[in-house]
Amino acid sequence: MGISLYSQCFFCFICILSIFCITNYFLQNAYSQCLQDQRSLLLQLRNDLIFNSTRSRKLVLWNQTQDCCNWDGVECDGAGRVISLKLDGEGISGGIHNTSSLSALGYLEKLNLAENYFRGQIPGGILNLKHLTHLSLSGAGFGGQVPIEVSLMRRLVTLDLSYNGLEIENPNLKMLLQNLTRLRGLYLDSVQMSSAVLNFFANFSHLTTLSLSGCDLRGSFPNIIFQLPTLENLDLSFNQLLTGSIPQFHRNASLRTMFLLFTNFSGPLPNSIGNLSMLSVIDMRNCSFTGPIPSTISTLTGLIYVDLSWNFFTGSIPSFYMSKNLQLVDLSDNSLSGSIPKSLFGLPSLQILRLSNNQLSGRVYEFSTLHFPHIVALDLSRNKLEGQIPKSFFTLERLETLKLSYNFFNGTVQLGKLQRLHNLVELDLSYNNLSIDTSITNTNLSMFPQLFSLSLASCNLHNFPDLTNQHSLGLLDLSNNRIIGEVPNWIWEIGNGTLVFLDLSSNMLVSLQKPYHFPSSLIHLVLHSNLLQGELPPIPQHANYIDYSNNKFEKSIPLNIGDSITNLRYLSLANNSLSEAIPTSFCNATELEVLDLSSNKLSGSIPPCLVEKVEQLAVLKLGGNNISGHIPNTFSVNCNLEILDMSQNYLEGRLPVSLANCKLLQILDVGNNNIDDGFPCMLPSSLRVLVLRSNKFHGQVRCSRRWTNLQIIDIASNNFTGYLYTKIFSGMMLEKDGRLGSDYIHYNRQLAYVEGYYQGTVKVIVKGVELELVKIFTIFTAIDFSCNNFEGEIPDGIGDLRSLHILNLSHNTFVGTIPKSLSKLTYIESVDLSTNQLTGEIPRELTRLTFLAVLNLSHNQLIGPIPSGPQFQTFSTDSFQGNIGLCGFPLNISCRHVGEEDNVSPPDPHQEDEAINWDYVSVALGYVVGLGSILWLLFFSQSFRHKFNDQTEQAFQKIYNAKNRRKGHRGRTNRRRHC
Ligand SMILES: *[C@@H]1O[C@H](CO)[C@@H](O)[C@H](O)[C@H]1NC(C)=O
Ligand SMILES: *[C@@H]1O[C@H](CO)[C@@H](O)[C@H](O)[C@H]1NC(C)=O
Ligand SMILES: *[C@@H]1O[C@H](CO)[C@@H](O)[C@H](O)[C@H]1NC(C)=O
């Protein structure tokens, strides 16, 4: 028994001993004690480094255990040599340059110094580590050119130099990397390399990740890189000058993620994108892709994230029926059409679906919300969707964003029915054909506790929805409804001061319920186009954008208005009945960029400090008031004015010479005043629109300066004399394509929460009709020199103003013949040469002017037959009367007895003077590219307007606001010389 016991104990002892030995053996190999020299090198490194000990999680703890291989961030090999050093995010700000300790750690294979605060070049000490396979310096703070030594680090498998201030220009990318063919992961995001050529990557047979975001890459991206057999992740985003196209993909292609956003890649997506069976993320937003989205993309089962927004894709939306893992689909801002595939509302993982700003049409049918459980954001706005909004939308309980605005959805929506959407943050139902029933039964409940943004513009609202319990509401748009009565004062209390943006414009509101206090959170307040009356409401203290225009506010503007509006950038009080002087306190509103006080009853003079101190001012509109005195000659040398409108006042004296300081001035309108001056040759060459109409300007129009951007010059009804020089309009000579483009003068600095732009407006007067060009298209050009004392011949050079649309030289004393060169004005729509002393015949060449809609040659001394041509058939006798020598249609004078040609068509006795030959008009319309001609026809032919379809009429209404001059704003009589 004893022996047995003894032997058992012995056996135990042997066992324990051997376990100890074995463990010790393994321990020694796996975590061998670090070598003494390695330990002291690490300690020396630590001493050299300058780091923030409160941020450091590793370096601060070094030295606490004996075995340096156990230190955080340190890894050794079996022999106790340090092979990996990971010091990312340690708050290191220096000390690496002067040290040899790092380069002495010669066995290092992995080095990570990411997210630190180094400065200067990448030190050679790092680059001498010949065994390195993994180097990460991402966000480490280095700058300058990446040194050539990198090219010697032939063992590198991963190289990450992203997000420093680095550049790779000389030596260039190829010289640095072409021999590092073992690379699998290369991250150079934000390294500047505008001259990089990338073809050499074709030799990189192991490359799995190539990340070159924001590298300023230029030129064409080599397709061969897409086809590298091992490539999984490609990121070329934010290289806006990088062009390229997507090649065919082979089966077994290994791409998983593809980031091409904000590049200039273009062309179609190939059907073979369906071969990318591993693809999970594709982000191509803001490129220039065209053509359809291949339906093969729907077979990719691994897709998680698809963003193809802001391209030019056409055709229908793919069904994605096999992509059950999709979490995000963003196809907004393309030209996709057809209906929304039902399968999209059955994608079980989808969280974000954005299809806004396409041409999608048809109904959206009900679906089972069980199969669509995760949706958080749904944006279908700006399409052509119709029918009822599916009730299924209102049961998607996780929904935070629902945007359906600018469609043709119809029917009634009861806000109360949205009760289940208690996570809603943003709801936009504006601009459909909806009626919203705002009655909420249980008002004690805060229905949408998270709701921040509610847009119900143009929703047939007749009263304010009860929002008293919406504690998070910051943005409320109830514009374009039929709300009558008072603005309730609870609206300012919403959420106890969360309201930032409020738009109640275009309703029928008459007053603000008193007492009221604007919340200090309010930044953007739009009340225009209501029936608000009485005194002007105060300006909310922190407001940035205020529009009180188009109401019935009266009395004076508070004298201290400018002292309290230090943040205000946009203020419009236009079209009210405000009286008395412009308060000088406006001069204290130094951030003001747009000030519109036009069309009121303001009097007094313009405060000189206004144009001197408010240097940010870009738009100043004081037109249509009773302002008198001189325009102050105090325009600051830092003048930023782009649009200056002082028209229709009683201003006198001279145009101030300091206007020359306004080097950005595009529109100057001082028409209808009493200004007595010569032609303002000092005006800056930036000028596009100059209106001096109906003043007392005099002298010759002759300057050495040329306004190459000038589009509209209206100096009618003054006392100008002398010859007509065409050189000052040389801008109109540019061979533009003459069409009305979308490029118009506008003011578009970012304002508050909207992309606010302030359109330049100017009035053009033709045939007694005043047109207000709300948008001045940069291609719209007009010359109006009528009612002056110009003399001599109309120069031939007039024909060089190729993009001219309107020419009015009437009521002068021009002599000589009508220049044949007028026929070169291909886009001309209106020519008025009436009441001059022109002689000779009407040039036949004028019949070539296919866009000509208005011609007035009356009251001259013209002779001979009126040429016949398509356009000429549409002119009435008014165009030619008062010329004793003219004959032929439409005048009732036959040319036979004048002894001229016989082929002039005799007037049809049944045809009325005003009639238009519709065949010719439609021929003209067939050629119409310039929208302008349609517009002119609309204006000058009542019967044409009736025949024209409503839609175009609406479009036209939006572009032009026609006002009959005789029914001027406040019935002010024209006190000028009538001409
Ligand atoms: C790359 O390697 C080739 C041959 O191995 C050599 O001739 C060339 O100089 C190397 N280039 C660089 C930049 O190191
Ligand atoms: C709504 O629109 C659909 C199709 O666009 C139409 O058939 C239906 O009559 C409309 N309903 C109402 C109430 O206007
Ligand atoms: C501008 O504000 C100051 C005080 O902030 C005031 O003293 C001054 O009168 C104001 N200027 C004008 C023109 O109102």
Image: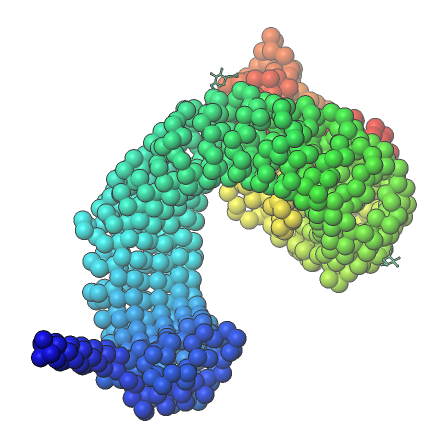
Q: Give the position of the C terminus as an image quadrant.
A: top right
Q: Residue 728: image x %, image y %? A: 66, 51
Q: Is residue 456 above or below residue 649?
A: above
**Nearer to the camera, 824 or 351:** 351
Q: Does the image show residue 795? A: no
Q: Residue at x 48, y 22 (%)?
A: 388
Which residue occupies 32% across, 71% down?
A: 159
Q: Quadrant of the N terminus?
A: bottom left
Q: Relative to residue 530, is residue 230 depicted above or below? A: below
Colour scheme used in the picture?
Answer: rainbow
Residue at the (36%, 54%) spot, across then down: 259
Horizontal and vertical percent position of residue 924: 51, 26
The residue nearer to you, when weighing 389 against 579, is 389
Task: From the viewer's side, name the closer residue of 902 and 490.
Answer: 490
Is 416 situated left or right of 789 in this image? Answer: left
The image quadrant that residue 791 belongs to is top right
Identify the image quadrant of residue 895.
top right
Q: Position of residue 531 (x, y in %)?
A: 77, 29
**Residue 446's x, y, as percent?**
62, 34
Residue under the image location 85 percent in, 33 percent down: 534
Extreme residue toward the front, this view:
1
Would residue 361 be seen by someone viewing this image from the given angle? yes
Whether 784 is drawn above or below 247: the answer is: above
